[in-house]
Image (tube, rainbow, N blue to C red):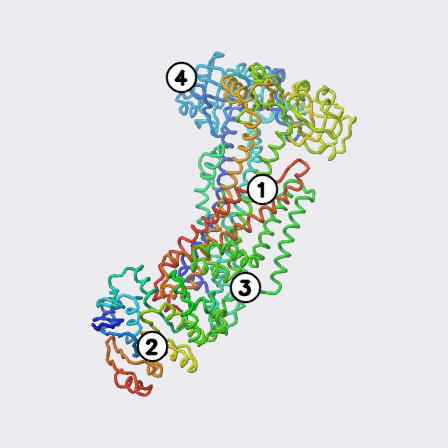
Amino acid sequence: MVALSLRGLVTRKLRTALTALAIVLGVGFVAGTYILTDSINKAFDNVFQTANQNTDVSVTPREQFDNAGTSQVPAAVLRQVQSVQGVRLAAGSVSDSAATLYTKDGRDALVRGGAPTILNGESPRALSPLTYAEGSEPSAPDQIAIDKHSASLGDFKLGDTVRVSADGPIRSFRLTGIVRFGDQDSLAGAALAIVQTPVAQQMLKMVGRYNSINVIADSGVTPQQLTDRIRAELPRQLYNVRTGEQQARRDATDLQDQLSFLRTFLLAFAGIALFVGAFLIVNTYSITVAQRMREFALLRMIGASRRQVLRAVLGEAFVVGLGASIIGLLFGAAIAPALRGLFTLFGADLPSQGLVLETRTIIVSLLIGTVVTVVAATGPALRATRVPPIAALQDAASLTRGKTGRLRTPLSSAIALIGIALMCVGLFGGASGGSAAGLIGVGGAVVFIGVGLLASHVVRPLALLVGLPLERARGVPGRLARENATRQPRRTASTSAALMIGVALVAFIAIFAAGLKASIDHAIDDGLRGQLVAETDNFTPLPSTAARSLSQVPGVRTVSSVRFANVQVTGVKSTKAVTGVDPTTVNSVFETRWKQGSPSLLSSLGPGTTVVSKSFADDNDVKVGQTLDLRSPTDQRLAVRVTGVYDDQSGLLADLTLTNTVLATAFNETRDAFMIATTAPGQSSDAIQKLADRTLSAQYPTVKVLTKEGFKNDQAGQIDQLLGLVYVLLSLSVIVSLFGIVNTLVLSIHERTRELGMLRAIGTSRKQVRQIVRYESVITALIGAVLGVVLGAIFAVLVTIPLKDQGFSVSVPVPTLIVLLILAIIAGVIAAVLPARRAAKLDVLRALAYE
Amino acid sequence: MTANSIVTAVDLHRRFGEGEAAVDALDGVSLELPQGDFTAVMGPSGSGKSTLMHILAGLDQPTSGSVVIDGTELANLDDKRLTQLRRDKIGFIFQSFNLLPVLTAEENIVLPLKIAGRAVDEGWLSQLIDTVGLDDRRTHHPSELSGGQQQRVAVARALISKPAVVFADEPTGNLDSTSSNEVLGLLRRSVDELGQTVVMVTHDAHAASVADRVLVLADGRIVHDGVAGTADDVIDLMRTVA
């Protein structure tokens, strides 16, 4: 039986290859994701080990609550540590990625594509993980050292002028050293700029404070002993004291936590591709089993048991699945760098040095590919066992016609409804983020299965809808294509269902993103009174002096800056977001709607008061007049009285709003996230924007000043970028489903060999035969696309219902959806290339002789 | 070459395989089929009769020799021209009907015209449908027709384009005797009433007796060429020559 399975694989090479390819792609995606994220982890493990290799004890500020953000260590703590017995050397470390290293001409950032520049205060040699490849450490305030990678990238030589900015204007330095990080030329892709520590503190607006303290122990004192001694000296609530090794491990796990999001994100897309692949396998095996009914009947007639028939089909699936998984695993090693490249392309640079292949990756990849294939083949395999032995003697044609079970339709409807119910539970059931997303995802998958099963009912009308114009335009080939597409509705349905999944997700994302953009536009139009918006182009806070520079631009009247921070509110579980505003100016740049109170509350905001959002008030039963106890990321406590509740749909004002002064003193947040400015009436705000942008960019190259329109486009651009990434990742599923169309067409053509031979004999040209196949493919693809767009729209409407409160408006991007349908037509044409060529090449004589 | 010859073949050879295993399916066959002639090609299995028909119809290429159909030499035609020739000048009837299951009887009949992009002569169509006796079956699909009815559709399909010659490959091979007679009668009438030229490959003596002329092939050569006579004559003939 096994031999028979293998023989079958060899004789049906193309079909096997196409089926396998679907698994190869899916498994490759899974393996590639693991390999990439493992490689990144490994790279950062190395970074953290190198960074801490000379450190015996490390003192870092303790994060006060989830997402509080890190705070800093005052110089007094450094002195305290230095006085601990057994400390040979303790130094404060200053290191911040909110810096920019410029090209030689000083016009552009040297490192692009998401990789940060880290500005470092120079540490004593004994503690430093850096080695000097050329020159030496900066020994004067105007001296700098940079990493070797950046030096060669920017063509910097010792003695050259190097420009760097952090929280303030650009400063020029003389290059005195070129460093390596351990044995690497850069820090996992990031650029390094090393200046004297006081200079770094000054540039980062953290004079008298450090990011951490690194300690070397006297000989005879173990790191652990010294750690214990230092820990005893410092307030436990504020500082983590760890050995260098512990710190390295801690840093690595923190990073892994962050990366796990990336992994989940990518695995979700890999899962979709595999899901689509499963559809394809079910379909392929259904068709081949139907075509081989006589063969199975013959086997049964000569004494094979049902179990043996089952084993023959499943054995074939097992071999295909395992083989494809092995190739997929290898393919994953190729996909990993491609995925990394993709993220770089979309602005996120992920470091990695070499590829890491964990045993886990191998096991998961092989298991998932094989299991998916075998499970998907089980249904068709069971059908193969049900063929009666007598069928071997009957007409083949009567066997291929699938029986439609009476329960099929109600059952499929039930499946689709269960899927929708699952999605609704996820959406409205109040489950937490992760499990809600899981429920929605599983619900969506179940809906796809249900609709895929139901789709056979709509194949005929849909084929008529998309096929009639073809028939009008193309005559007989169009007619035959349509008839062929509807000949076996279930087959066409499941083939197009595979494409439907990818299209539905693309349509869903497109509709969702369009709604998001529309909502943002709406919010900006409604909420923004100012004409200009200033922000940085790399999501870092604005330099603190930028506000003054902007206000000095002629034509700019009022500048109001906005800050963000996180806070813990006593009695409220999760961390809440705080917006900091300038009470004197906020109302001239910003329009708010109020549930209780009025905009004047913002103007009268002071150290002891706050205004809160409607959703925060509703969720936590907070009333006006109530006093909230807040805890800041720097562990300062403050009591604020709630004076009003706003209903802000712009998303600018977060859960709580405080003044910028409070954020500076109690939260140590001195940097502005962005600024809004008004322009003098009667003057062209476009002209002022141009002038302001030019003026600010000259001083702070990362800062841009935008008009309201420009700000909208900028926001839309960010969404589009993410959208692009998601589209690329979804395209793999679409490609898999195209293999499905190819497979179905090839198998159908095989079935219709005789017909094709007759058509050729009575004068159908090769071109017409190709057309028949091509149009059938286009019809199938369009059915999938139409179903997908409809389903995607339904999903989008469903998912955005809970967002209605936050001002989310559904907007249908008609042009995008039309493009999607056109792409489906093109996809259909592409999928038909190979089958059409096969059909046209058919030898007429042999086709006619074929039984 | 006679002036009214529709199909002319000169010294056809067709060799399959090479070297030791080579088989000469046709070994020097020459023939002329005049307009309005009903010719039956007979011979035992492996005699080359199907190969001859395939080559005459432009479905297969001879190893050597020439075929001229209605004035067109086939040897020089590429696939495109051959397709056109089949479409315009040749009608086919197959043993296993070979109708498109997705089309109705009428649609199957006019298929060659549709493929060629030619207009349907409605008068001719209804005359044909009338002749083959399928007036009440026009909109039926092949699966709803009996074997004889399906083959009658196939005959109408072969005649719809008024081809120069109709090739029928064992047209009665899959039919019972009543249906066989219907189909053979149809072919006969197409010759007598419409002046159609028909070539029929068969090994059924009764079928051959409906023809005007019988060619008998054996081992790739024509061993007999004469008038058909009755079925008994044909049976006797086969006994003596093959």
Q: Is label 2 or label 1 in front?
A: 2
SS of the residue at dot 4?
loop
Q: Mark 4: which amino acid?
A: Leu
Q: Is residue B23 above or below residue A659?
A: below
Question: How many angstroms separate mark 4 from mark 1 (CA)?
Answer: 57 Å
Q: Is label 2 or label 3 in front?
A: 2
SS of the residue at dot 1?
loop
Chain bearing tag 4 is A
Chain bearing tag 2 is B
Q: Is residue A295 above or below residue A522?
A: below
Mark 3 = which residue? A382
Disc nearer the start of the sequence (4/1): 4
Quick check: marks 1 and 3 in contact, CB under 8 Å? no
Across and down, in percent, residue B132 comes to 42, 75
Quick check: marks 2 and 3 in contact, CB under 8 Å? no
Return the mark for residue B191: 2
Chain bearing tag 1 is A
Return the mark for residue A158: 4
Disc nearer the start of the sequence (3/4): 4
Question: How many angstroms separate mark 2 from mark 4 (CA)?
Answer: 102 Å
Q: Name the residue furthest right.
A: A625
